Amino acid sequence: MADRNDIFSWIGSEPGKAALAGALGGIVRWLTLKPSWREGAGTLLVGAICAVYLGPIALPIIESTVGKIVPGGDMAGLSSFLVGIGGISLSGLVLDIFERRRRDLKGDNDDDGRT
């Protein structure tokens, strides 16, 4: 079993803060859309994962769009929170892009007329 201090020190690290902000964004999405418990738990997990990996990518986009509006300059936390809210949609978009690229490289055609 992991030592409690290890868990708390990880939460205080940059990836831990991003995961927490993303999970909180997932909770906001869950409470707003009111899906089932199972979907809500998935939203929380996806929000945390997306925030850790996509939050740093979204940070420059958010800063250039809204500026540095957060007191104390924690735009990384805001970025992770926003990515957590949109984690399901964002991950779906990324997967769709990869799938489209794979189909284009293979020359596959879908039954619905898309290439």
Image: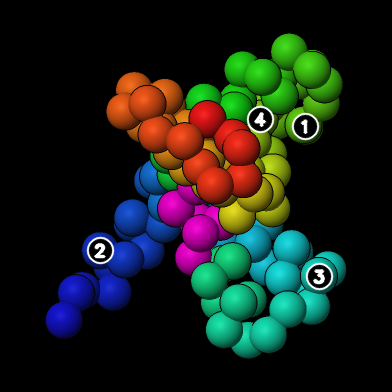
Compare marks 3 and 4 and give the one earlier in the sequence: 3
Compare marks 4 and 2 and give the one earlier in the sequence: 2
How many numbered discs sit on the rendered protein?
A: 4
Residue 101: quadrant of the picture: top left
CA distance for labels 1 and 3: 29 Å
Compare marks 3 and 2 and give the one earlier in the sequence: 2
The secondary structure type at the circle numbered 3 is helix
Q: Amino acid at mark 2?
A: Asp
Crowding at label 4, few (<14), some or many (≥20) Cα neighbours within 10 Å? many
**Residue annotated with mark 1:** 71
Crowding at label 1, few (<14), some or many (≥20) Cα neighbours within 10 Å? few
CA distance for labels 4 and 1: 9 Å
Q: Main secondary structure of the magenta part?
A: helix
Identity of the residue drawn at 72% across and 71% down: 30
Mark 1 or 3, which is nearer the eye?
A: 3
Tell me if label 3 and label 2 are in contact, CB under 8 Å.
no
Give the percent coordinates (x, y) of residue 108.
39, 34
- Give the answer, above or below, for where 106 lies relative to 38: above
Magenta includes 49?
A: yes
**Residue annotated with mark 3:** 33
- Image check: 95 left or right of 75? left
Identity of the residue drawn at 82% across and 21% down: 66
Give the percent coordinates (x, y) of residue 4.
28, 74
**Residue annotated with mark 4:** 75
